[in-house]
């Protein structure tokens, strides 16, 4: 594993050997989870908003084409987790 961007080597130096098994993993999660959310969250949100806007633009122009587009790309969309941004669009259309 590439330790280039990990806080683990620094934590292993700072924490005594008797406490390493518990506190290295705990402190690494406390440090890295918020950093990951601050970086990945905005990127995912931007991509999700762009895809939702694109799908709604296609839907407003040609609904059948939007259905084919979503159906054809559904497995890829689910694989990357962007299906969560499509479900509110679907629910909104069902209510209307």
Image (cartoon, rainbow, N blue to C red):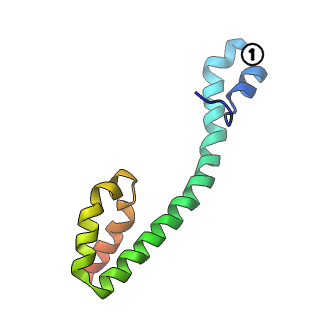
Q: Report the number of discs.
A: 1
Q: Is residue 15 above or below residue 64?
A: above
Answer with left or right where residue 35 lies relative to residue 72. right
Q: Which residue is mark 1?
A: 16
> Where is residue 37 drawn, in percent x and y?
58, 51
Residue drawn at x 23%, y 65% as measured from the top left:
71
Q: Secondary structure at mark 1?
A: loop
Residue drawn at x 35%, y 61% as measured from the top left:
83
Residue 94 shows up from this direction:
no
> Which residue extends farthest top?
18
Q: Is residue 94 above or below residue 77?
A: below
Answer with left or right where residue 77 lies relative to residue 4. left
> Where is residue 73 drawn, in percent x and y?
29, 62
Quarter of the view holding residue 51? bottom left
Disc 1 crowd, CA 10 A, few/some/many (<14, 14-19, 20+)? few
> Where is residue 67 drawn, in percent x and y?
23, 73
> Where is residue 56 drawn, in percent x and y?
36, 79
Quadrant including the N terminus: top right
Q: Is residue 17 above or below residue 38?
A: above
Quarter of the view holding residue 10? top right
Quarter of the view holding residue 4? top right
Residue drawn at x 36%, y 75% as measured from the top left:
55
């Amino acid at each position: 594993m590439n330790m280039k961007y990990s806080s683990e080597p620094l934590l292993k130096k700072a924490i005594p050997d008797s406490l390493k098994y518990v506190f290295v993993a705990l402190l690494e999660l406390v440090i890295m989870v918020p950093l990951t959310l601050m970086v990945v969250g905005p990127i995912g949100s931007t991509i999700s908003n762009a895809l939702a806007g694109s799908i709604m633009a296609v839907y407003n122009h040609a609904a059948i084409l939007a259905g084919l587009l979503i159906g054809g790309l559904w497995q890829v969309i689910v694989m990357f987790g962007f299906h969560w941004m499509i479900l509110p669009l679907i629910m909104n259309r069902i209510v209307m």
